[in-house]
Image (cartoon, helix red, strand yellow):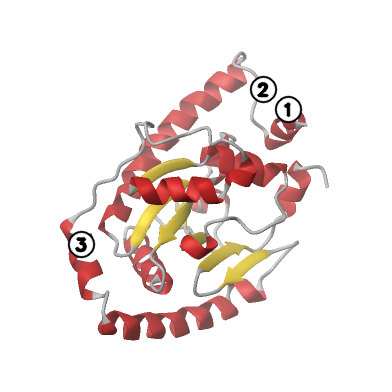
Amino acid sequence: MREEFYKRLGRPVGDLGLKRREQDVLYDKKWKIFLRRTRLFRHLPFVDFVFAAGSMALGNINKNSDFDVIVGVREGRIYTARFFSVLAFGALRARRKKLTHHEHAKDKICLNHFVTAKSACLSPPHNIYWQELYQNIVPLYGKKERIEFFFKANNWAGEPKTNLTDLRYQHRYSLIKTTGTYILSGKLGDIIEKKLKNFQIKRIHSGFLESQGFAPRIRVTDDELEFHPDTRRISELIGF
């Protein structure tokens, strides 16, 4: 079943063959770009950890692949963390917008999943796609204990295939992040979080919630923001 899944995924099974070598070269180039761009997270307040997900975790990339991430944030500041993420990557023209596809999404950061400690475990259903993805997600940034907590919360997927000895993992954060987190941690931060929540929910309702496709995974709460408006591709991969 696993081999059939990867055939559908488009990743060559085995290490031989021109197609596999070409994909490996492209994969390495993509990782260099991805790692350069995700360093920005170390400056953003309330971002506790970041994982590489999607095609970069599963290895089924093509020249137009974007960069999916799972972003872990502090409880009570999910909308603030998302706001600064959208603002920062948008300013650098490195964020994938919801309506962009193919070459317009190429090498852009896709901010489609924010979680807190309460929502660290992926909501079911847990099919082979999600199992393979959560076994292969790559820790890029964050505190060791937060990342280990996330792995433990998702033990339904089995033993993770990457760990904190991975050279792509970084844990240092900047003075900008420390200062921003300090300033926005008190009552002022509570007020700003509330305003940002109201603003973003309006945007979400006029965007994602009105453009849902096949079997969408959309979650908008104070503990989780997940935007997978169309999962047809996932259903095709698992043979449904």
Q: Quadrant of the N terminus?
A: top right
Considering depth in this image, is 189 or 197 the residue closer to the camera? 189
- Left or right of residue 121: residue 163: left
- Element type where label 3 sits in the image: helix
* Disc with the residue nearer the chain's start (3 vs 2): 2
* Disc with the residue nearer the chain's start (2 vs 1): 1
Residue drawn at x 71%, y 42% as measured from the top left: 128
* Disc with the residue nearer the chain's start (1 vs 3): 1
Q: Position of residue 86 (x, y in %)?
A: 39, 65
Residue drawn at x 52%, y 59% as measured from the top left: 113
121 w.r.t. 128: above or below: below
Q: CA distance from mark 1 to mark 3?
A: 45 Å
Residue at the disc numbered 2:
13
**Residue 217 location, quadrant:** bottom right
Asked if residue 48 shows in the view, the reply is yes
- Left or right of residue 76: residue 60: right
Mark sitting on residue 178: 3
Amino acid type shown at disc 1: Glu
- Left or right of residue 174: residue 71: right
- The residue mark sitting in front, 2 or 1, is 1
Amino acid type shown at disc 3: Thr
Disc count in the image? 3
Residue drawn at x 40%, y 80% as measured from the top left: 196
Considering depth in this image, is 217 or 187 the residue closer to the camera? 187
- Element type where label 1 sits in the image: helix
Mark sitting on residue 30: none
Residue at the disc numbered 1:
3
- The residue mark sitting in front, 3 or 2, is 3
User: How would you rate the neighbour count of disc 3 (Cα within 10 Å): few for under 14, some for 14-19, many for 20 or more?
Assistant: some
